[in-house]
Amino acid sequence: MELLSRKTEPVGDGSFEKLKLVGSGGFGRVYKARHKDWCFDVAIKILHDGVNMSLCDEAYHMDKGSCNFVVVLHGTYQGCPPGVTSPQQGLVMEFMARGSVQSLLEHLSGPPQWPLVCRLAHQVALGMNFLHSQTIMHQDLKPSNVLLNDDLNARLADFGLSRVSTSALNSNREKSVMIGGSYKYMPPEAFEVSYKPVRAFDIYSYGILLWSIITGKEPYPSADYDLVNLKIPQGDRPCCKGIDLMREREGLKELVDLMERCWDGSPSKRPPFKGCLEVTENVFSKHENGIHDAVGQVLTRLNSPTSNQSNTSVASSVLLQTPEQSKPNDTVDNGPLTQTERSSTQDCVRISTRTMSNTDKAKFVDKNRAKLIKDATMVMAMIEELGDMVHPETYSLIDAKPTSHEQMRALYQTALRSGGEAVKAAFYDALKNHQRDLVLRLGD
């Protein structure tokens, strides 16, 4: 492949130091490492067994789609990361220090400052427009695949599904990947067995992504694949309650109109990304002077050890809703906390300085089962830290679940049930590493 002749030979373990697992998903694991000669951090993406054939495809699409709004591909990897005994192949990419749009919204418990919302909407549209100009369809556009650098600029990532851009999703493995990764961002026509992806697929996903950025919420948080498969083709879309209460924000009306045109049930009525850019560029231009302060405020909150203490949202209740159900006078279904709620939340979020025993940790995991199933994220990354405590068959069973909620439920039903106190204590430690704010909120 042309990429391999343009990039360096595969980089081995000897070139890296400080390898650390930082994430896990449907396609594989992501490690952070420092390249000894380059002297900067990189991300190494390792695909799960059985999907290695997509590695070159993803690298090719990343290289072909290279621009200011796509994560930079530095080369390929071949080696054995920590905890792995057999040689692995992967991609060496730009390390995005601020995670993803999804993690940003989770940390803030809502949308960021309005100028940053406008910039994110514009930068994603710029990146997608460039990909489409290069005849590349992403097909997995969602908040977790929009990564952020130190200044919270957006870069598109995870081109694992681009390899099926010209064929129907007709193999069992391709269907399971799509369902597991992005069914909430799939257009209604994509639920048809004979569907062949076209550019309108990405445009629909962009509409749902806009909703998430504007509201700071996850679409259909309690809906499984079967419910989404049933309701989306009938015209249901994410709930728009509360958006009308933000009308004083200049440009919101234009973005909401664009969002609704992008998720139109008819693919032919969705605007191309070049048309989207006409809207996003105009809206962002009105707030560009405020972006420096907005980014500074968000970074201050992200860097604060108590960033979520006074802004922890109540349980989300966003439901599937038809466009006709959204009314101008609807109230916010998950709005700001009242003073009473805020005080109560703060009372529950006090940093503990005591040393917990394994028994205490196990009790915490048992006591908070329902809340952890609902709110825990990056489940596979935490399971990775359990190592041999989770049998490979159990790992595969959990990894196959389409949502973090179902992964957590399966973890409770398997390893946490049979492993006893030791496994629960180890999981508590992993949870504290990945979601300290959640542990604090639940009352460590």
Image (spheres, helix red, strand yellow):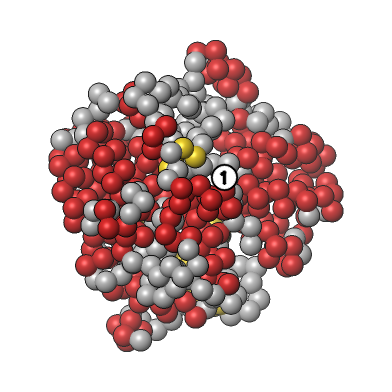
Residue 438 appears in the picture as rendered: yes
Above or below 78: residue 307: above
At label 1, the amino acid type is: Ala
Image quarter of residue 256: top left
In the image, 82 versus 167, the foreground residue is 167
Above or below 410: residue 76: below
Q: Which quadrant of the figure contains the C terminus?
A: top right
Image quarter of residue 4: bottom left
Identify the residue at horizontal 31%, vertical 44% (top origin): 259
Above or below 141: residue 86: below
Q: Is residue 322 left or right of residue 137?
A: right
Q: How many marks?
A: 1
Q: Mark 1 points at which residue?
A: 223
Residue 252 in the image: x percent, y percent? 26, 33
Identify the residue at horizontal 66%, vertical 76% (top origin): 85
Above or below 408: residue 172: below
Q: What element carries label 1?
A: loop
In the image, 437 versus 165, the foreground residue is 165
Residue 433 in the image: x percent, y percent? 60, 46
Q: Which quadrant of the figure contains the N terminus?
A: bottom left
Q: Is residue 389 left or right of residue 147?
A: right
In the image, 231 versus 213, the foreground residue is 231
In the image, 39 versus 420, the foreground residue is 420
Label 1 packing within 10 angstroms: few (<14), some (14-19), many (20+): some
Residue 20 appears in the picture as rendered: no
Identify the residue at horizontal 25%, vertical 23% (top origin): 248
Q: In this view, does 197 lie to the left or right of 179?
A: left
Residue 122 in the image: x percent, y percent? 24, 48
Residue 200 in the image: x percent, y percent? 32, 60
